[in-house]
Image (tube, coloured by chain):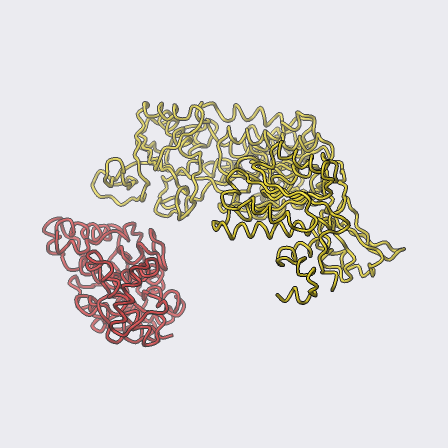
Amino acid sequence: MKYAYYPGCSIQGTGRAYEESLLPVLKELNIDFEELEDWNCCGATAYMSVDEIKSCVLASRNFALAEKFGYAEIMAPCSACYLVLNKAQKYIETSKPVAETVEKALSSANLKMTKKIKVRHPIDILLNDIGLEKIKQHVKRPLKEFKVATYYGCQLVRPYSTFDDQYNPTSMDRILKALGATVVYFPIKTRCCGSSLTGTLPEPGLFCAYIILKEAIKRGANVISTACPLCQFNLDGYHDKIEKKWGNVRIPTLYFTQLMGLAFGISEEELGINRCIIPLNIQSNQTVSA
Amino acid sequence: MESVKMNSNKEGARIGFYVCHCGHNIASVVDCKAVAEYVSKLPGVVVSRDYKYMCSDPGQELIMNDIKEQKLNRIVVASCSPLLHEHTFRNATEKGGLNPYLCQMVNIREHDSWVHSDRAAATLKAKEMARAAIQRVTHHHKLETKKVPIRPSVLVVGGGIAGIHAALTLANAGKQVYLVEREPTIGGHMAKFDKTFPTLDCAACILTPKMSEVGSHPNIKLMTYSEVVKVDGYVGNYTITVKHKPRYIIEEACVGCTECINACIYTTAKFPDEFNEGLGKRKPIYMPFPQATPQIVVIDPQTCIQIKTGKCKKTCLEACLDRKAIDFNQKERFSEIQVGAIVIATGFKTFDAHRIPQYGYGKYPNVFTALEIERMVNASGPTGGHVVMRDGSEPKSIGIVHCVGSRDKKTNHYCSRVCCMYSLKLAHLLKEHSGAEIYNFYIDMRTPGKSYEEFYDKLLNEGVNFIRGRVGEVTDWAFIPEEEGKLIIRVEDTLAGYVRRIPVDMVVLSTGLEHQPDADAVRRMFNMSCGSEGFFLERHPKLAPVNTFTDGILLAGCCQGPKDIPDTVAQAGAAAAEALVLIDKGYIEQEPNTAFVREEDCSGCKSCIPLCPYSAISFDEQKKKANINEALCKGCGTCVASCPSGSIVQNLFEDEEIFSEIEGLLLDNINEKFAQGKTTQEVLAK
């Protein structure tokens, strides 16, 4: 099946390393996908909190496009997109007024939604459509030296636990273990990263990020893995400010796809790892012939 | 097919029809007067009345008087479900001088007024249903009930406090009781408890006298380490097959001296002790606990070297001397018992705390379940009553988390009813035993019981802390230096209105009550139903709380739903009383809805014989015909439907009765149309 790849804004902006690493990993695993033509804003967190119905309209235009081009499933790698698309779908399903407004808005653009397009996260696809066995087969350089704190953030599993447990998600853990990495015990894997507070109320926002970073180091991790552009941004981008306030908690934060790419033998440059502010200093020496 | 043609006035049927208002229950949706008026015009109907409460004495007298005065020979009552009042109206019919089976009921309450709101449509439906019954009742004929003797013995399944109390009640009434318990001893969960709320009397002190009474009662045959594997028969005459698991001890020979345990090749106890929730250790040969009943040791085949490898010095055998009570070659065996009634008291299991990973059970060593703490605070428990953490040190602060696996849509939606009270009890005991600071985290404090609220007040005055809010997580993630090395309970304090972090040394999870894991298999074996939460379903939540939908099968204790000890004992007494009602009557009145063979049509093909679930059909070799034993027939109708020649007939469900009822339901004004000279085909093609 061909997935409609829905990048969203972050993944081609501040979080471009996510896309840079995601695409080669998908190609390596022969996953059939295509960028959704003429996609637009998902409706985003900020919009959703101002005007839910307009946010739903924005989201559903993407669904209508996917339907028009004949896709059954949308792949949304950004946690915020993933949540908002799911949320919009739920609202349209359960509220008649929302559904009617959306229908009207779409029809003015000669679009319509007649069936449910499934929203999928790459972790879900990798785990449930591709499978750990196949992922293992592609590992050329097992991540032996990597002690990973798997950090899920909030939006991936809450409030909708579509493919993993809300309180104790383990999907990313399983993928990283399959790559040969050690996954450390990390009890705050779904705690807030600081979210957009880091921009508006920096002190409490950065403190959230600090807690995550400090705890990851305390639990013996040498790298944090994430699946969200905002989490990566908050955990990687503010180390100077955090250090001034609370002390040094330097630890690299990578997208899980970057870690996958490394294990698949793709170069750091290709995977956008050079974009990290805190550099990755772990070397996986062992090379296994494919 | 001209036989389809209805002639309701068959052999001069004189029908009385009564439609009940049931107060507003029926009359608010169905126009009862219109129904009575409509029915009065149907052929054969002599009397047609509507009345406010047909089940009342004046209502029944209406029927009786009409039978006498109007010479009625058929009665139809349109009211509620026959489950409720069929007996009433059959009785009234009989008192009026007719055979009770000449009465037919129409359910226009549960099947009509309670499920519809459109008055016109509901009234039409009531008319059609009444018409069907009028058509049907003309084909009824006199039937007699049969009396079958009942066996004066009872099987009690499960030897917890419910089973113990039911068994003793029945045995004291002079009945033979078979008490089957799957564990090596009776006592159930209650035997594990330290004190009981709200009186704080010692559980063992009040339970063990009853246990030993069971063990020595002349009317109780106790079968421990045994399970019911097969149930045959029906109310009054059940045949039960019991599997006796090998305990590798000859029960009659063992005197419970426990010399064998002392002599075991394992000088120290090494294996997790089930009775102490794994907190203590036992040897492969063990007595579950000091007051175990029966006082017979048991050998665990998983850990006994002799049973596993055959290469043990068998020091236990030497210690047993010439009693020779140990038999390593014991095999499971089966026995059969005959009983008249069955009390199911299979109990519950506690919620598996692993299922809520954010509470850290199994991850953090000092997170305990409430049942583990029950054993810990018990003087005869693994720590002799000392409250200690897994490393042996004493806790300075303890958090008790309520509603673990209760009132939670992700696990169990229902309230387990006992956890608030046992958490209060444990709070008291933990404080008393350890002097630690105690925190209770509750959603709502539920203390509905005699002296329960007073107990809660007592705890408030003892200085136990109460924080209202469901605990979000138990974590070892420290935020400030004071939290380092502690377990932190994160909770939204809904009274203070903010999220709190309470660091404690020890966490107690007040796990809820769940159905037994094999409840579904037990349900099938005894032909019961389960509610959505998995507990066995009572026949009526208010008026038949210990009966099931199968006659002669009764419920007691937590297998029916979570409840505390007082409620369990009350229910066990009620179940015993219901069993006595059956037994002391001496016989079962069997409905005459049995099947019989019309021999002239029977071809002797025998296809019905293997199909009968009650083995009621035999084959008469001389006549070459099938023969149904009426005493064994339960009227299920399987043979009737399967007979290729249509030679098996079932009383009250004869073809003419069923067909005329269906046609009465489907065809409007059928008789008028026949009267107009229309053929069956024309009428059916309408």
Chain B colour?
Answer: yellow
Horizontal relation, residue B421 to residue B113: left or right: left
Q: Residue A267 at what x, y percent from top left?
A: 24, 73
Q: Is there any visible trace of residue B180 in the rendered image?
A: yes
Q: Quadrant of the N terminus of chain B?
A: bottom right
Q: Residue A37 at what x, y percent from top left?
A: 26, 76
Q: Is there any visible trace of residue B329 in the rendered image?
A: no
User: Is residue B122 depicted above or below B298 in this figure?
Assistant: below
Q: Nearer the viewer, residue B293 or B615?
A: B615
In this view, the residue farthest toward the right is B622
User: Is residue A36 depicted above or below B540 in this figure?
Assistant: below
Q: Nearer the viewer, residue B516 or B43?
A: B43
Q: Residue B315 at what x, y percent from top left?
A: 61, 37
Using the rendered view, name the quadrant where residue B424 is placed: top left
Horizontal relation, residue A53 to residue B276: left or right: left
User: Is residue A149 depicted above or below B94 in this figure?
Assistant: below
Horizontal relation, residue B276 to residue B554: left or right: left
Residue at image coords 24%, 66%: A58
In this view, the residue farthest toward the front is B676
Q: Quadrant of the C terminus of chain B?
A: bottom right
Residue at image coords 37%, 24%: B432
Using the rendered view, name the quadrant where residue B389 is placed: top left
Using the rendered view, name the quadrant where residue A25 is placed: bottom left
Chain whose colour in the figure is red: A
**Total tally of numbered discs in the picture:** 0
